[in-house]
Amino acid sequence: MSTLTRNILANLLGRIAVAILGLLAVRCIFRSLGADVLGLMYFTLALNGVFCGALEMGVCSTTVREISASLPREPRYVIEYCRSVSFAYWGLYLVLVSVLYFSAPWLVRHWLALGSVDPGTGTWIVRRLGVAALLGLPRSFYLSVCRGMERMDVSNGVDAVSQGLQSIGVAAILSYGGSMTAAVNWLAATFAIGIFLYIVACSVLLSWRALVPWLSLSAVSSNFGFSMQMGGVSALSVVHSESDKAIVSRLLPVGALGYYGVVSNMMVKATLATSAVAQAAFPSLSAVIRNTSRAEALSRYRRLHDLICFGTVPIFTGVVFFAPTLMSYLFDNHVARLMMIPVAWLALGHYMNATLNIPFMFSLADGRPDIALAENVIALFASLPAAVLFVYWYGLAGAGFSWVFYHLVLYSYGVPRTCRECLGTPVWDWFAHIARIGLLTAASYGAIWWVGTATGMSATFWGLTLSYLVGSLAFLAGARMMICEELQNALAGTLARFWQIREPAA
């Protein structure tokens, strides 16, 4: 099994485990503590995501790129670079903790529309959970070390363990009558456990010396330009990905934020296949572009792009098919009906995001973060004001559609530049390929959805499952004739190796 394939599988399995365990915690928190507490928790996590993403400064992408391409030839430089990043990130963590601690009362009293939770309790939750969740900033550095060394099995193992402790612990505390205070304290403790496990893992993989904070100006200056551009990309991407939740938190009740936060988080978990491939692709493409040939890099791009574009369709359509059932289980039937349209828009937006992942990774590996930076600046002025209007006019459905609108802006600017300046392919060929996949999806899943709704077959879980399976078979049959030759050969080779492994055991 190749390193790329191993990392894709590790990412995939790790994210499945984290997603399942996360849903367990959501159900327990909603059932025991209510929608307002759940909304406060998601607000805190989203706020910390904005802080960490805005101040990540593109260093994580630079770390993956530098470790994957430079570690075999310049191990001393890599250690100096990692020490400098550790110095910067832990320093920023301390600054962010101070900012969050002193701003929490204002946020709770003047930004959120609280219901059953009093401002004092809300402030305590934001402070306690926020200080722990901000460990996500140094954690992102340790995660990028694992990705740069192409050891996604390690990073996903750590994530699965920490999420497992978090979810099982919360479920146990609330099931046995534990208080909200105990649940929040346990959630905070698991963030600290996770960062400790990452430190241990990275010290074994790389070197404990590489994790000791120390500033090396030479290591910083050699990557300053790339990091600053990637910092702009990261900050703006976080603004766009979290803006819908921020706007919902301001214009709608905090309970609605809880529902929308769960659905949005669930949709992010549905991108596990996308992120599994993309995160494994970045160090691989970086190494091939720098050390091998551009022709090989383009071949690998086509294979990975088709793998995501075709492979994620059954996942996102599955979310649309089964989200009402899942929402009824987590919340109730009223919430399930309320979230149907937002789920559909979010699924479409996340699929559009999936189609952009490998072009984005190729442009970064090619040293062109300026394309992503420019498209996100344009989207800031085009999609952010529109998102406010969409939420104001249409509520949660408008919040979901704002994610689609944002990607339409990226399609209109980023894709043409990436095709012309990095891939060297005709722009309309790229769009025609995505359009063909869209038509195949509508003809397979759309048709069976219409039949199931018209006949009442989709009213039961088993009828819905049968409809989804029939649609999936129809889609896969059509996809078999449309995927690129590189992916066909790769799939054939994987199947051949699988049967070779099985034959001796038989």
Image (cartoon, rainbow, N blue to C red):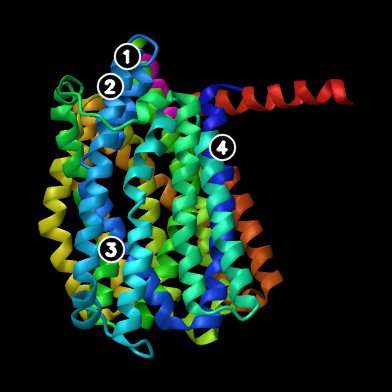
Q: Which quadrant of the figure has residue 379? A: bottom left
Residue on which the image places disc 4: 10
Q: Percent x, y for residue 148?
A: 40, 27
Judged by its main secondary structure, the magenta piece is helix
Q: Between marks 2 and 3, how big is the CA–CA gap?
A: 31 Å
Q: Which label belongs to residue 80?
A: 2
- Left or right side of 372 for 472: right
Pair 3/4: label in front: 3
**Mark 2 vs 1: CB contact within 8 A:** yes
Q: In the picture shown, does residue 306 fall above or below 338? A: above
Badge 3 element:
helix
How many numbered dots are placed on residues in this image? Answer: 4
Q: Percent x, y for residue 412?
A: 19, 47
Pair 1/3: label in front: 1
Residue on which the image places disc 1: 76
Circle 1 packing at 10 Å, graded few (<14), some (14-19), many (20+), is: few
The three-letter amino acid code for the residue at tag 3 is Leu
Q: In the picture shown, does residue 490 fall above or below 292? A: below
The three-letter amino acid code for the residue at tag 1 is Arg
Q: In the picture shown, does residue 436 fall above or below 37? A: above
Q: Which residue lies furthest to the right in this view?
A: 506
The three-letter amino acid code for the residue at tag 2 is Glu
Q: Between marks 4 and 2, how big is the CA–CA gap?
A: 29 Å
What segment carries the magenta color?
Answer: 293-303
Residue on which the image places disc 3: 47
